[in-house]
Amino acid sequence: MRLVIQRSKEAKVTVDGEVAGAITRGFVILVGVTHEDSEKDAAFLAEKAANLRVFEDEAGKMNLSLLEVGGEILSVSQFTLYGDCRKGRRPNFMDAAKPDHALSIYEAFNGFLRDKGVKVETGVFGAMMDVQLTNDGPVTLIIDSK
């Protein structure tokens, strides 16, 4: 399982011109799932994301977590995170999980975050989405569960 986490001041995702999810201060997380990922991977990454100390404290140091600042998450499923671009010019998506498995793990990830008290907004799984965000910093991290 792979996450791209972007610290943001505000963000929203729209589908067919309608806002599907929106947040203020927090993270936009692009979520990729591969075949062998399980709820264990989802729980590990939810714990990691909620507790990453990348928000500034009163001294201006990245020392506070999303939980500590009361941040929100906009979680967006993105199978293209498992696009293999090593050969040719067209990405190979063979490592991306099939939709039914990916949806199950993606929903588990969001559920684990909500269990920690995090407000989680989402896009629409499998839809073409427009994601807008104000990247704060910018701070962008990539985390893999393996």
Image: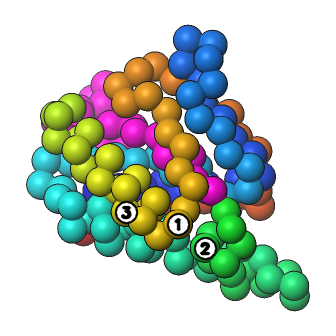
- Where residue 86 sits, quadrant-wise, is top left
Which class describes the residues within 10 Å of circle 3: few (<14), some (14-19), or many (20+)? some
Highlighted magenta segment, given as a residue range: 72-97
Q: Is residue 52 left or right of residue 42?
A: right
Which of discs 1 and 3 lies nearer the camera? The answer is 1
Which residue is disc 1 drawn over?
A: 117
Q: How many marks?
A: 3
Q: Position of residue 71 (x, y in %)?
A: 67, 63
Q: Which mark is residue 112?
A: 3
Q: Mark 2 falls on what kind of element?
A: helix
Q: Which mark is residue 15?
A: none
Q: Position of residue 93 (x, y in %)?
A: 23, 33
Question: What amino acid does circle 1 point to?
Answer: Gly
Which of discs 1 and 2 lies nearer the camera? The answer is 1
Q: Residue at x 32, y 72 (%)?
A: 44
Which residue is disc 2 drawn over?
A: 67
Quarter placement of the N terminus: bottom left
Residue contact at pointers 1 and 2, CB within 8 angstroms: yes
Q: Earlier in the sequence, mark 2 or mark 3?
A: 2
Q: Is residue 115 left or right of residue 51?
A: left
